Amino acid sequence: MPAHTLPDPQAFPKEFLFGAATSAYQIEGAVHADGRGLSMWDSFAHNSGRIADGSTGDVACDHYHRMESDVALIQSLGHTAYRFSVAWPRVLPTGRGTVNTPGLDFYDRLVDQLLARGITPYATLYHWDLPLALHAQGGWLRRDTCHAFAEFAEVVARRLGDRVHSYATLNEPRCSATVGYQEGRHAPGLQDRGMALQAAHHLMLAHGLAVPALRAHTRTAQVGVVLDVKPYYAADTRTETTHAVQMADGVFNRWFLDPIFHGHYPQDVWQAHGDLVPVVHADDLQTICQPLDALGINYYTRGHVVHDGALPFPHAREVPVDGATYTTMGWEVFPEGLRQMLVRIHREYAPANLYVAENGAALDDHVHAGRVHDPVRVRYLQEHLEACAQALAQGVPLQAWLGWSLMDNYEWGKGYTQRFGLCHVDYATQTRTPKDSALWLREFITRHRAI
Ligand code: FCB
């Protein structure tokens, strides 16, 4: 590997926050505890036959029962921020109506614990665990689900209020819609492009309705959304490939960024979808395009593609890059893409603030004599933090970097086969072991705090 530049802690403003992210279904377990209802992920994990190792999130990292020691762990890693998600079915077991107080209490305690240990809370309201009862009524294909979501947002904000520094309505509406309703690899496991487009529209509408609901019960908390972004690059010089790159970018990035920040769908992709475009009511785009305080982006890799007419729209086939490093997800390590996306989003969409809400690598990690040597992840963190430093130097209003993930966890359709954690988890004993990358990051944060 050629040498690379190490990030300089001084390149980050004093108030810059560093930490890690998780999501409810991936870590909490305790799926029947204290009145929690079921989500469509409980059902998908148990019944679809599409989880790589046949596993479920029933136990996961048992975080629900270990929350206090996990927060102590976060503090011991030196983190100054933590992003978690609130499980909708814990708070409203059937999606709407009567609040399940013990479920809401859990997040109330979590936030208090974080604050007591000097860790800034970032809360995501929807990280894919749609209450099963709402899914049974049509889920994200049904417009009414958007209103149910806004009610849920209000319940959470009423309780957690300004103790949460930053609320994100949704995590990755693109992934929810595309992987869940078109590719069928995630819940609810449907395979229909038109349905995916309708689900995406409803997710964005839900976001737009939730923003004022959150603002009604907060004064200082930031309100925003988390989007997954991925830059696309042509792997050959054919005109068809240039077009495929434009469409892939449109489908992945602009389909969500344009409505949320500009109040319209991208024309080129809208036309390309033909009859499959979603039903959009008169004021929907106005509702979707709310002023936001912050945008979180999840960045993992890029798309390096060629046109392939045999593939469905956008006809973009990913091709490997010679000499590149790949994670066990099969994702290329490409830190320059993070800098480029940050700069591009700042220039084209100008959110008031940006934060990296997820960024990380899955690797084949093992514990040896109490240590986990993960040099590839150490380097991944160094290079991506350097990309953040460069974006800051270019004027991007970046506030925080949150790694994915605090600890190894349930990686959706891949079950427990992927280890993204800064901490290794032994699922048999629930032992958490900070990996070398976590120790490197602690050192980096410590140097930053000493400025
Ligand atoms: C993102 C998800 C997150 C995790 C990472 C690897 O798409 O938001 O929950 O699964 O990918």
Image (cartoon, helix red, strand yellow):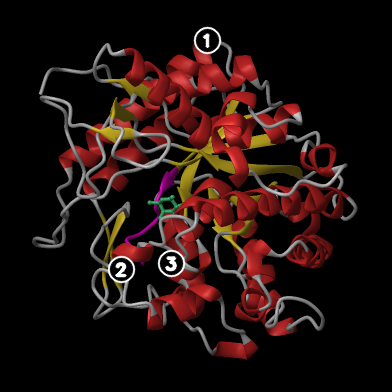
Label 2 to label 1: alpha-carbon separation? 39 Å
Q: Main secondary structure of the magenta part?
A: loop
For residue 407: magenta? yes
Look at the image and give the residue range highlighted in magenta: 403-410
Q: Secondary structure at mark 3?
A: helix
Residue identified by numbered label 3:
26
Confirm if mark 3 falls within 8 A of ligand 1.
yes
Of badges 2 and 1, nearer the viewer stands 2
Left or right of 238? Residue 273 is right
Q: Is residue 392 visible?
A: yes
Residue identified by numbered label 1:
394
Kind of residue at badge 3: Gln
- Which quadrant of the figure has residue 308? top left
- Return the disc, 2 or 3, that comes first in the chain's sequence: 3
Q: Is residue 425 above or below residue 316?
A: below
Q: Secondary structure at mark 1?
A: loop
